[in-house]
Image (tube, helix red, strand yellow):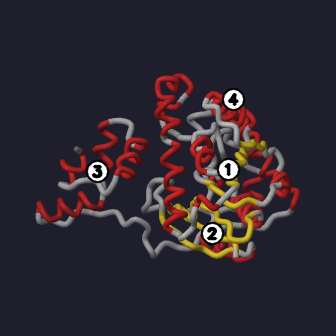
Amino acid sequence: MAYQLFLGRDPENTDVVNNLCQTAQTPKHLRDIFIKSPEFLQRMTEVLQKPQAIRQRHPFTLPKIPVETIVSDDAMDQMFDRIHKEWEHLGQTEPYWSVVTQPQYYQAEFEAHREQFYTSGNYTSQIFLATLRRCGVNPAQLHTCLEVGCGVGRVTGYLAAAFAKVIAADISSQHIAIAKNHLQSKEIHNVEFQHWHKVQQMHQLPQVDAILSVITLQHNPPPVMAWMLKTLLTQLRSGGVAYIQIPTYRNGYFFEVERYLHSTPPNTLEMHFLPQQEVFRIMTEAGCHCLEVREDGMVGAEDQMLSNSFVFQKA
C-alpha cells in the first residue's frame, strides 16, 4: 500500500517488501523511509514544479579515509581480546538486539517477536544463494559452508537446509549457546559450532566451499577486519566462493592503532570501516578474484557511509 500511495507503483519484488518489514518498525518510520527516498523526492519535483533536495547516495567527491591496518601480533591480540570481551558482555545482556539492533529485540520485548526475528534469517540466506546463482555458482555443488558471525543462529538453520555441513563460528560463547539450543529445538544436526576467543584459532579452520559473513566484520577494528578477511579467504577450496559484507567508507572516519588501543572500550557495538582498496589488495593476496561487488545500504546514512557486499572466488 505504501508503494502505491507514495510512489504510484508496485514494489519490485517480495524481497524489498521483506526488507522493509525488517527495517521499519512503526508507521512513522515507514513513512519517513518513503518520503525521504530519491524516487519520492523526484516525483515531488515534478508535481510541485520545484526542485527538491535529493541526497546523493555516496558522493564521488568525498576524500580518502586514513586507516592503519598493519599492526604487531601483540596489538592484534589486544584488539581481538577487546572485541571478544565486548561481545561476551553483549551475549550476556542483549544477545538478540546485538544481532539485529531493533528495539523489539531487547530482552524485555523479545519473546513476543521471536518468530519474526528468526524468520528474518531466511531473507539473508536467500540473498546469499540467489547471489551465488547469479554469479554462475551452483550452491548444490558446494558441500561445506562457513558462517562467520553466526550469532544466535538466526541464519544458521536456513544455511543448514542448503548445505550438507555448516561450520558456525562466533566470538561470543553466550550467542553460540543460544544458537545451539535454537537448532536443537528445530532438530538440525549438520552444524558444527566454533567459539573464537583467540584470533589465531582461525588458522585451524578446515578448507570450505563457501563462506558467508554479513553484519559481522564491521564490528572489528580495521586491522582485525583485514586479518580475518585474508585468513578466511585462504581457507577457501579451489573454486570456492565467499559472500562478505564490509563497510568501506564513512565521511570523517579515521583509524590510528595507538589511539584505539588507549581508548576506553564502549561495551557495546563498535562500527569500523575497511577501504575498498584494502579489500581488493587482500583478495589478490589470497588468490581470489571478485565476481560481484554491490552497495548494500546495510549501515544507514548512505550519503555519509558506504557498505559493500563482495562475492569472491578462489582461483
- SS type, badge 4: helix
- The N terminus lies in quadrant: top left
Coordinates of residue 180 in the picture (x, y in percent): 69, 33
Q: Are marks 4 and 3 in contact (CB under 8 Å)?
A: no
Q: Residues within 10 Å of mark 2 (few under 14, many from 20)?
A: many
The residue at 30%/54% (across/down) is 36
Mark 2, residue position: 312
Q: Nearer the viewer, mark 3 or mark 2?
A: 2
The residue lying toward the viewer, choosing from 197 and 274, is 197
Answer left or right for 196 relative to 24.
right
Q: Residues within 10 Å of mark 1 (few under 14, many from 20)?
A: some
Q: Nearer the viewer, mark 4 or mark 2?
A: 2
Mark 3, residue position: 34
The residue lying toward the viewer, choosing from 222 and 115, is 115
- SS type, badge 3: helix
Q: CA distance from mark 2 to mark 1?
A: 21 Å
Residue type at the position of mark 2 = Phe
Residue 53 quadrant: bottom left
Answer left or right for 191 relative to 50.
right
Residue type at the position of mark 4 = Gln
